[in-house]
Amino acid sequence: MKLVGLALVGGIPSLVVVVVFGAVGLSLSVAGLVLLFAGKAAAAGMLPWWMSMDVDPRLAMIVGPFLSVVGLICLSILLLYWRFASNVVNRVIHPRTV
């Protein structure tokens, strides 16, 4: 059972969780901040000449923080999974003697 537990924690599911939650969390966090600052720049009329915004800047300023929060939640889930996996590995490798 210990070997099955280590295989589950250290195998394909871990790879999928780390890649998916890491990529989604990082990209949404950065995209949310960029969208927020782009919305503020568009509202102030300070966007560079090579950028354009087709939507209302207020919408961008509302959606940006929401995307960042979703990204940070994904990164928090990834952190919780890392803690769970490290606890499982530590329990198997270093069993407590009673």
Image (tube, rainbow, N blue to C red):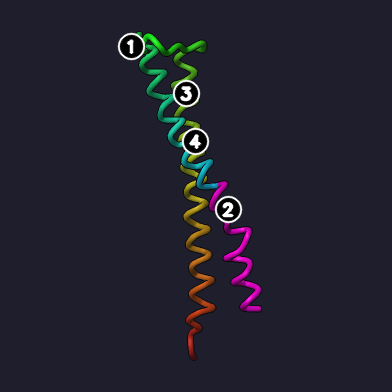
Q: Name the residue under label 2.
A: 17
Secondary structure of the residue carrying tag 4 is helix
Q: Is residue 41 left or right of residue 67?
A: left
Closer to viewer: mark 3 or mark 1: 1
The location of residue 60, given as percent across then percent down, is 47, 20
Q: Is disc 2 in contact with disc 3, using a CB cutoff of under 8 Å?
A: no
Q: Distance between the residues labelled 2 and 3?
A: 29 Å
The location of residue 69, given as percent across then percent down, is 47, 37
Residue 4 against residue 76 in the figure, above or below: below
Q: In percent of the image, x 50 and y 57: which residue is there?
A: 80
Q: Mark 4 points at which residue?
A: 28
- Mark nearer the N terminus (1 vs 4): 4
Q: Distance between the residues labelled 1 and 2?
A: 40 Å
Q: Is disc 3 in contact with disc 4, using a CB cutoff of under 8 Å?
A: no
Q: How far apart are marks 1 and 4 (CA)?
A: 24 Å
Q: What residue type is labelled 1?
A: Met
Q: Distance between the residues labelled 3 and 4?
A: 14 Å
Q: Which amino acid does label 3 sit on?
A: Ile
Residue 94 against residue 50 in the figure, above or below: below
Closer to viewer: mark 2 or mark 3: 2
Q: In percent of the image, x 48 and y 47: which residue is there?
A: 75
Q: How far apart are marks 4 and 2 (CA)?
A: 16 Å
Secondary structure of the residue carrying tag 1 is loop
Q: Mark 1 points at which residue?
A: 46
Circle 4 crowding by C-alpha within 10 Å: few under 14, some 14–19, many from 20: many
- Mark nearer the N terminus (3 vs 4): 4
Q: Name the residue under label 3.
A: 62
- Mark nearer the N terminus (4 vs 2): 2
Within the image, what quadrant is residue 50 found in? Answer: top left
- Mark nearer the N terminus (3 vs 1): 1
Q: Give the range drawn in magenta.
A: 1-20
Which quadrant of the figure contains the N terminus?
Answer: bottom right
